[in-house]
Amino acid sequence: MRLLALVAVVISFPALADESAADISRKSREKGALNLVGLTAELKLVTTASDGKVKDQQLSSSSRTIAGKSHALARFSAPAGVAGVAVLTVEGAKGEGDDVSLYLPKLKRVRKVAKSDRSKAFMDTDFAYADIASNGARDDDVTKLADEKVEGRDCFVLKGKGDEASAYGEVKLFIDTQTYVPMRVEYQDKAGKPFKRYRTLKLKAFKERVIAADAVMENLQIGSKTQMTVLKLEDSALGDDAFTEQALERG
């Protein structure tokens, strides 16, 4: 399911009674905060390490559907050490991981993030590269469980498995029935041990949509966490040509 569904943005309308687990999963992951189709968001990431050290980062995130595939673009603006770093994520074919390209301004070149590296930390946060346009599980591999109330919201409950490019084993998602915003996601590692937990902390309306204005990803095994806050949200002015490796180099 495309990102993490880390922060989700969706049109607010009641769920259809005959929606499949895959349909619910797809609606959720297609609206993630690092995968905002048709929108651009200014985001703040605050990562607190297990020793209490805090690191702030800011970035812009945009997404567009091109030729039926989701394309997500993230560009960092602060602090100075990461300013100009950009990450382009293109949805992979069915059953395959996403294609991730990383632009490093100090080297002035684009490099592919190897499949084996996509489970690693995204820019030293508690999100992984595989989370950028995914919430951890595959759309075609989720099953629907009984609904539950989470964070005060009625939620669909889906259970699935992480793909080969992630470090996740079982993934359990709690998706708001009205907005399709993931209110909570529980991740196990490949050994079946609790690994990470994502939670939506605050919802906010934007035009005809609802977004998770604040969310947090916690690493339960090492005791760190990253909070993601939406600072600004607007309709995207980027065209298809902005979502290419050539555009990464142009800045």
Image: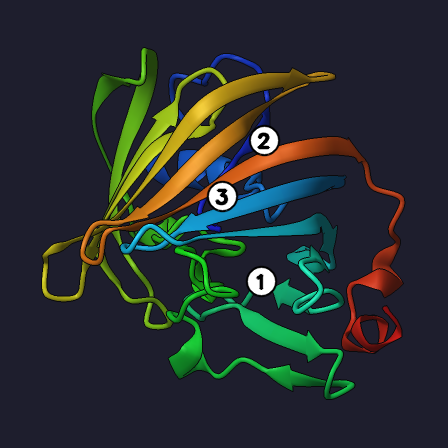
- How packed mark 3 is, by other alpha carbons closer than 10 Å (few <14, some 14-19, many 20 or more), is many
Residue contact at pointers 3 and 2, CB within 8 angstroms: no
In this figure, which residue is indicated by the disc labeled 1?
91
Tag shown at residue 9: 2
Amino acid type assigned to the residue bearing label 3 in the image = Arg
Q: Is residue 104 left or right of residue 190?
A: right
* Residue found 45% across the figure and 17% down from its top: 15
Q: CA distance from mark 1 to mark 3?
A: 11 Å
Q: CA distance from mark 2 to mark 1?
A: 18 Å
Q: Nearer the viewer, mark 2 or mark 1?
A: 2
Note whether 32 is above or below 70 in the view shown. above
Tag shown at residue 245: none
- How packed mark 1 is, by other alpha carbons closer than 10 Å (few <14, some 14-19, many 20 or more), is many
Q: CA distance from mark 3 to mark 2?
A: 9 Å
Depth check: give the residue in front, 221 or 234: 221
Residue contact at pointers 1 and 3, CB within 8 angstroms: no
Q: Position of residue 162 (x, y in %)?
A: 30, 59
Q: Is residue 1 visible?
A: no
In this figure, which residue is indicated by the disc labeled 3?
29
Q: Quadrant of residue 153?
A: top left
Amino acid type assigned to the residue bearing label 2 in the image = Val
Amino acid type assigned to the residue bearing label 1 in the image = Glu
Q: Quadrant of residue 204?
A: top right
Q: Is residue 93 left or right of residue 200?
A: right
Depth check: give the residue in front, 136 or 50: 50
Note whether 57 is above or below 200 in the view shown. below
* SS under mark 2: strand
* Residue found 58% across the figure and 72% down from its top: 100
Depth check: give the residue in front, 104 or 34: 104
Q: Position of residue 4 (x, y in %)?
A: 44, 47
Count of marks placed on residues? 3
Locate the C terminus by quadrant. bottom right
